[in-house]
Image (tube, grey):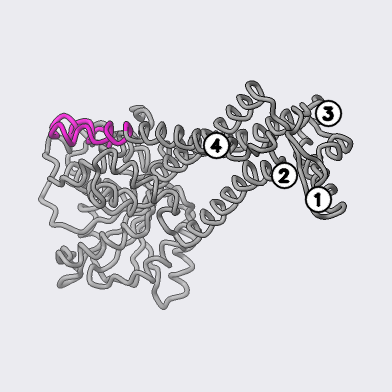
Amino acid sequence: MPREREPWTLEELIDFEAELMRGGVPDAELRSEVVSATRGLEGIAARRHGLKVWLERARDNAPAQLAATGRRVTGAFGLATTLCFLTLFLTGAGAVAGLVDRGLGGIHVTLALAVLLGTQWLVLGAGLLGWLWHRRAGAAFSAAQVLLGAVVRRISRTREGGWWTQLVDGGGHARAALLWRLARLAQSAGIGFNLGVLAALAGIVLVRNTGFFWETTTTGAMRAGLERAVGFLSIPWASWWPEAVPDAAVIEATRRLPEHAGCLPPGPAQWWLFLLMAVTVWGLLPRLALWLLCWNAGRRALDNLDFQGRAHRALWRELTAAAREDADEKPLDGVLVLDVGGTGLDHAALRPFLLRRLRVNPTAWESVAVLDEGAELQASQALANAPAGVVLLAEGWALSPPRMTAVLARVRAAAGTGKPVKFLAANAGPGGQPLPPTPDERREWERFTDSLRDPLAEVFCYEETPPA
């Protein structure tokens, strides 16, 4: 049995989408190569393996500018990450510099906590709400991803539309891989901001006499709130580094009153150590954790690519349809054929097509979606005993998406989600002889099956079978 190739990379996925936009019909040699390479693989594994074979051959024949699309875009991601990191690094350093009161020679600690940590958590909270809303609404991008996506497209000279739009509109794991890469870019920028804050705080303390203070017009509310905030924020390190935790005495001593005049004395050390630890623990570490989460989610999205977009499924049909007739493997036994709605098609006349084209040998025929309770019960019992999968037989002109979706749901509930399901569309001629569906009917069946996004569901349309 062949082993599936290495997992897809984002560069390969982008090249795949770009090459898919070129169109073109695979030749017979490539079809044969894909079928040979995927022999022994089933379902999603066969599709991932076979489409990578197709991509490798397409890359060899593609113009240089198309062959380099994935490399150019991933390079643009790297450059955009560097630019965003440096921009936010300087922004963080500038925020610290802006917090220094030049007249007093010190930093207002409550303002520092609000600006350096409070704004970050507001942004994270807004991002979380936006992500939840976009996920529920089924939208493609969040506002930050739209902005970062525009930056990447601009750097890589990728026009809006084309493969980018196809990748996003295709949905599923392919779109998720792109979105998680953009999310990782955003977290890299957040990491840069926090490192800029830490560098500026350390630099100011090392090269200047810097004091720390707080002030308020209330008698005790701000002091109590500040003590609680310090106590909460310092929980992660208070037990092993108490020197980095301002206690009540330090907090009271650094309150600036109206009668105080002149520059502040340096320190105390508890405040700048506390600010360094607070930014590290509550600013930098969450960003690092989110970066790792985005990296892992993007990797899993690439590992689980199922290529269920309409263009993906159409290409897979092109690659595998004609070559099935030349396959030399034995037709699969143990397949149940469900006649949906009572088509009246001659089962014996259909058998050669099932053997040669679908590569299945039906061992039972039942009816579903008919007004016969006995037949329905018998079909339900047979579904559980269909080890090799199910063929849903229906007339080409009689496609009813709600009914066929309901039938598929029954099949999945009874036979399990791991069984292959093949839709077979055929029209009934005189005496129940099968006839091919019309081109319009074929397109409607393909569109319906593609909309299901079921990796184990395929559609076949009856064709005249030449004599063996």
* Residue 19 figure quarter: top left
Q: Is residue 459 above or below residue 346?
A: above
Dot label at residue 239: 3
* Callout 1 secondary element: helix
Residue pictured at 75% horizontal, 36% vertical = 262
Tags 2 and 1 touching, CB below 8 Å? yes
| Magenta stretch, residue numbers | 50-75
Q: Residue 467: where, in percent of width, then height?
A: 10, 49
Residue pictured at 60% horizontal, 24% vertical = 203
Dot label at residue 92: 4
Side (left or right) of 116 relative to 432: right
* Callout 4 secondary element: helix
Q: CA distance from mark 4 to mark 2?
A: 17 Å
Residue pictured at 29% horizontal, 34% vertical = 38
Side (left or right) of 29 relative to 162: left
Which callout, 4 or 1, points at the residue further toward the start of the chain?
Answer: 4
Q: CA distance from mark 4 to mark 1?
A: 26 Å
Q: CA distance from mark 3 to mark 2?
A: 23 Å
Amino acid type, callout 2: Thr
Q: Residue 416: where, in percent of width, then height?
A: 49, 52
* Callout 2 secondary element: helix
Dot label at residue 110: 2
Tell me the residue that label 1 is attached to.
222
Amino acid type, callout 4: Gly
Amino acid type, callout 3: Ser
Q: CA distance from mark 3 to mark 4?
A: 29 Å
Which callout, 3 or 1, points at the residue further toward the start of the chain?
Answer: 1
